[in-house]
Amino acid sequence: MVDQPVRIDLGSEIFSADVLQPSVGNRGFDVRKLRPETGYVSFDPGFANTAIARSAVTYIDGAAGQLLYRGYAIEDIASNCSFLEVSFLLLYGSLPNAGELLLWENDVSRHTMLNEEMRSFFDAFPRRAHPMAVLASATYAISTFYDVYRRPTREQEIDAGARTLIAKMPTVAAWAYKKSIGEPYVYPNNEFSYVENFLHMMFSRPTEITPIDPAIVKALNVLLILHADHEMNCSTATVRSVGSSRASMFASVAAGMGALWGPLHGGANQAVIEQLQAIHDDPDATIESTIARAKDRNDEFRLMGFGHRVYTNYDPRAKVLASFAQDVLDRMSIEDPLLDIARDLEAAALADDYFAERKLFPNVDFYSGIIFRALGFPQRMFTVLFSIGRLPGWIAHWVEMNNDPETRIMRPRQIYTGETERAYVPIEDR
């Protein structure tokens, strides 16, 4: 069924826009001819109501609290798949069979090493350098070792670039961490799985191999999967925006990392931990007073980890983590008072009409930081972990965008509110 065109009454004329049909979700109408035919532009700060592309990667129903990767529910994927399985799904559109998965895992594991010249790259950073700055810089730097990846034009080159990024980012992240604590770099070991290898490089030393707990491997797998993609969020839109100029996959992903670093995006889980810690350390703070501050319009305090730009229901990723967090802590025999505060805050907020009326539910950041902390990761690594998880999503969108004949270089319009034309005044007369 084809809908009739949308007609927009502009007073002196009528603009007709074709309706665009999704497979599921919101319909759209095509306004590409609005400005050339009428002189008008649409005004939509933050692109909150603007579709920048047709995409088949991820679907979100915010009202229903639903998240699908290529049609698969996030709850099913997180419970049953490895991170590399999900990476394959996002990149190639379907879950791999056993043979495909084995080839993919082996291919990734063979490319986890960094060129030895990269050691001097890490050595050049000060110890206090934030790991996210190192991660983004290294993404650019790695591409210099592979000339063909600067502007890949063939499918096998694109596949190789995707594999290289996914394989090497855990090594980069672990080396950035080792640099920050003054310990020697640990090389990858192909005997380990993807997540095991990352944990090995993070927490082992050349003098001793730290045992890898299967419970930690499972937990980190789930966390990476939950972060693997989330439709047209700020960082993914940035990857697409930079990529629309025909910038390389590496340059586009590095730009996405910069966007993710912001405290309103990937840095939010660290902000949650900092807030929970502040509540814990303040002898006068209670759950009741914290909720009251969040409801006070005259108080700048904001309850971190609640509410979402897209979800008007419980974030399905937070649901997975809410049930998973306690299991992880129990398995590791960890008692974290911040988890108790988080659970009490969640219960109080969900029982409060103020939060219910505004559809403010816990989001993925509310519990992810607690689990990252329980697994032994310092707060400065939280957004780095988010980046490793989001890599396959960024790459999938970059590939989809480059294969889309409708892609044009992104060039938003503006409503100009500055001075009109003024006469130049010589400096001696000003």
Image (cartoon, rainbow, N blue to C red):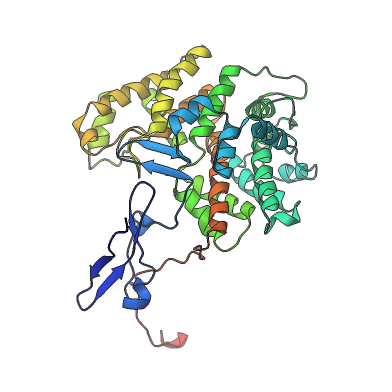
Q: Position of residue 184 (x, y in %)?
A: 74, 31
* Residue under the point 60% across and 35% down: 96
Q: Position of residue 132 (x, y in %)?
A: 58, 43
Q: Position of residue 283 (x, y in %)?
A: 34, 22
User: Dividing the image into 4 quarters, which one contains the C terminus?
Assistant: bottom left
- Residue in the foreground of this view, choosing between 278 and 216: 216
Q: Is residue 286 visible?
A: no
Q: As drawn, which residue projects farthest toward the right?
A: 116
Q: Position of residue 53 (x, y in %)?
A: 45, 57
In the picture provided, is 143 more to the left or to the right than 117? left
- Residue in the foreground of this view, choosing between 185 and 332: 332
* Residue under the point 74% across and 42% down: 123
Label count reads 0
Q: Is residue 170 visible?
A: yes
- Residue in the foreground of this view, choosing between 396 and 269: 396
User: Dividing the image into 4 quarters, which one contains the N terminus?
Assistant: bottom left
Please tell me in which quadrant of the rendered image residue 106 appears.
top right
Please tell me in which quadrant of the rendered image residue 277 appears.
top left
* Residue under the point 68% across and 48% down: 161
Q: Is 367 situated above or below 136?
A: above
* Residue under the point 46% across and 51% down: 55
